[in-house]
Amino acid sequence: MPNPSPLVVALAYDGLCTFEFGVAVELFGLPRPEMGEGWYRFATAAVEPGDLRGLGGVRIAADGGLELLAGASLIVAPGWRGADQPVPTPLVQALKAAHAGGARLMSICSGVFVLAATGLLDGRRATTHWRYAETLRTRHPAIEVLPDVLYVDEGTILTSAGSAAGLDLGLHLIRRDFGPEAANTVARRLVIPPHRDGGQAQFIDRPVPSTHEASRLSPILDRMRGDLSGEHTIRALAEAAGMSQRTFLRRFEAGTGQTPARWLLAARLNRARDLLETSSAGIDQIAAAVGLGAPALRHHFRRQFATTPGAYRARFATT
């Protein structure tokens, strides 16, 4: 009788990105008896023959080779040797065959270059670490590169930004497969939030805001969060912060990595997502509660989460 548990296969290669591989193991490879039967199985597939070494001096004994990909439900590319390093043809062929057979493909950080080499990302959205975004866009112009998000879910192909963003994407995938309670349980084990707001622009090198600036911005963020249905004009926010509009905009973006409008939209969408999961309110009511009309909520929700509010509720609602 076939094993009903989904098989996750992580790729291993010489020069393995150890942290990214560890992320895949932590998310999908640890025994989790509290999840009951049906939790993920995990295996490591060697991309090439011979000794495989990971960064930091570790050596990898893989469970098998590329033949393991044929039975996978999810294949994880945990980084790659470098953006300019070729992807072996047998790996490209095995990934394409596995995807055609129903496997999902997931990349962490520079692992997006492995997926890009298959051509399966052409015409789709994808992300990677902000340091690689321009290289990905230049070398693969058919991919719509989103450089300021933590991850992108394109259904059967999923990509994440810098290394730790693989945790965010993995929790999202667990949420898709097993529901919000399972994702929350894994997040608690990892001691990280089940949702991380914002995008990777927050982590690009920039001056640290002074304590005085932070003390003036924090109440503004609390004000916006506490009244998501409010209008929140730049003029009103700047006055509340005691700054000119120009200074407020500059310091807000320096402190959050986003414009006020983008920050507020992200907060509204995350609140809408929470309400879809936990309340029985209608879509129109939720849209009004977060300050968006129903058409705008559907538009931005689909763009941000690649699904509709109704489909999201059907999958993740706990009520």
Image (tube, helix red, strand yellow):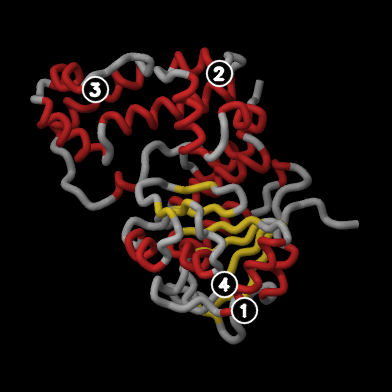
Mark nearest the camera among 2 and 3 is 2
Residue contact at pointers 2 and 3, CB within 8 angstroms: no
Q: Earlier in the sequence, mark 2 or mark 3?
A: 3
Which three-letter amino acid code belongs to the residue tagged 1? Answer: Pro
* Residue type highlighted by circle 2: Ile
- Precedes in sequence: disc 1 or disc 3: 1
Amino acid type at circle 4 is Ala
At x 72%, y 74%, the residue is 67
Q: Is mark 1 on a helix, strand or loop?
A: helix
* Numbered disc 4: secondary structure: strand
Q: Point out the frontmost of discs 1 and 4.
A: 1
Q: Disc 4 or disc 2, which is closer to the eye?
A: 2
In the image, residue 14 lies at what x, y percent? 51, 79
Q: Which element carries disc 3, helix, strand or loop?
A: helix
Residue 209 higher or lower than 269, as above or below: below
Real-space Cα distance between discs 4 and 2? 44 Å
Name the quadrant of the C terminus.
Answer: top right
In front: 282, or 43? 282
User: Which of the marked residues, 1 or 4, is nearer the chain's N terminus?
Assistant: 4
Instruction: Check residue 220 in the rendering and tell me which mark sits there, or answer none.
Output: 3
Q: In this view, does 109 lie to the left or right of 246?
A: right
* Numbered circle sitting on residue 90: 1
- Crowding at dot 4, Cα within 10 Å, few <14 / some 14-19 / many 20+, comes out as many
Classed neighbour count for the residue bearing mark 3: other residues with Cα under 10 Å, few (<14), some (14–19), many (≥20): some
Mark 4 and mark 3 residues within 8 Å of each other at the beta carbon: no
Q: Name the residue under label 2.
A: 283
Picture quadrant of residue 308: top right
What residue would you read off at disc 4?
12
CB-based contact (under 8 Å), mark 2 and mark 1? no
Which is nearer the N-term, disc 4 or disc 3?
A: 4
Taking depth in this image into account, of 296 and 199 the one nearest to the observer is 296
